[in-house]
Image (cartoon, rainbow, N blue to C red):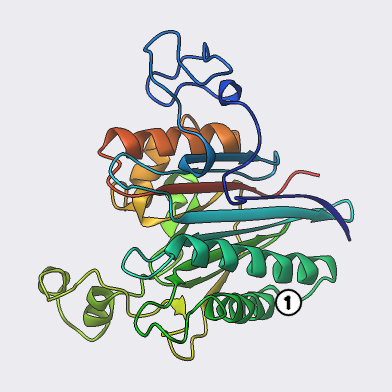
Amino acid sequence: MVLVDTARTPEGGPLGTAGDWPCVACRSSDVSDEGVCADCGRTQPTGRDRMVADLGLVAGISDRGRRRARNEDSMAFGVVTDGTPTVVAVVCDGVATSDRGDSAAQRAVDEALAVLLDAAGEGGDAEAATRAAVARAIEGVTALADPEKAGTAPSCTFVSAVVTATTVTVGWVGDSRAYWLAGSDARLLTADDTVAAELVAEGMSEEQAMSAYQAHALSRWIGADAGAIEPRTLTLTPDGPGQVLLCSDGLWNYLPEPAALVEALPGDPAEVVPLTGADELTRVALELGGHDNVTTVLVPFPPAP
């Protein structure tokens, strides 16, 4: 296979002028190169505050949100092809209670993307490649830890997708999510690695689990203090077109149900342009409060030649 292109969230954010994108507040296209909207006067976020990347077959937006001091999410994706494209994408959310969560997320997406692209280029097994990608991410994030500062190991969540002409393979650690969006067939593909989710799996009611102490705390994550971690994986064979959504909890906390995500898209999931869909989902999360960093990546299925 031949590598077509990659996009990732480099430190400082992708290059480009603020005027390249609609206003994040009023959606006006009249934004100056200095980043000021002529209609509402809003100064546009720059650098890691708002990162936008579009490869056509996959697009993503990562936004700081309205309450956080900085954006600790990262995303990375790429396309390889021999005539039939394979798209790989990774989203990581830095754990806010850890040291340098943004660095952990950045290192994890970079390391994992390299492994997934290599495997896609060689036609390797997607689930095996996902496990190898997480192992590489763990090595990279662990190397960021300062052995002289106990309890401050950088850490992050992880979710990835490998999308071919016939299958969708996802892998995850933590509470970043993957969804299949296709009208009435929309579904959540991942299961959160949280205290509440584990209590429900053990038989507790969801209401009881959500009221438990530290219900939303992660039970698994990527970091030097996480222990031996293997991702959970799932391979889906869709029977029609749709979109694969990877996102951080800054989006799904507001729109947790697949049907709500489909309704928020600007049209049929099978026909929505990835960047347009990612922009609209991000806008909705911001309008509903934007309490956390919001990262949204969309991959159409099947990837068009």
Rendered location of residue 259, percent (x, y)? 36, 46
Front residue of 279/143: it is 143
The answer to whether 84 appears left or right of 162 in the picture is right
Identify the residue position indicated by label 1 in the image.
Answer: 125
Q: Is residue 18 above or below residue 186?
A: above
**Residue visible at 36% across and 12% down?**
40
- Residue most extreme to the bottom: 228
Does the image show residue 80? yes
Quarter-wise, where is residue 64 in the image? Answer: top left
Residue at 19% in and 84% down: 203
As drawn, the residue found furthest toward the front would be: 148
Q: For mark 1, give the secondary structure.
A: loop
Q: Which x, y percent locates residue 79?
A: 76, 53
What residue is drawn where x is 54% and y is 48%? 297
Say above or below: 230 vs 257.
below
Q: Observer-nearest residue: 119 or 266?
A: 119
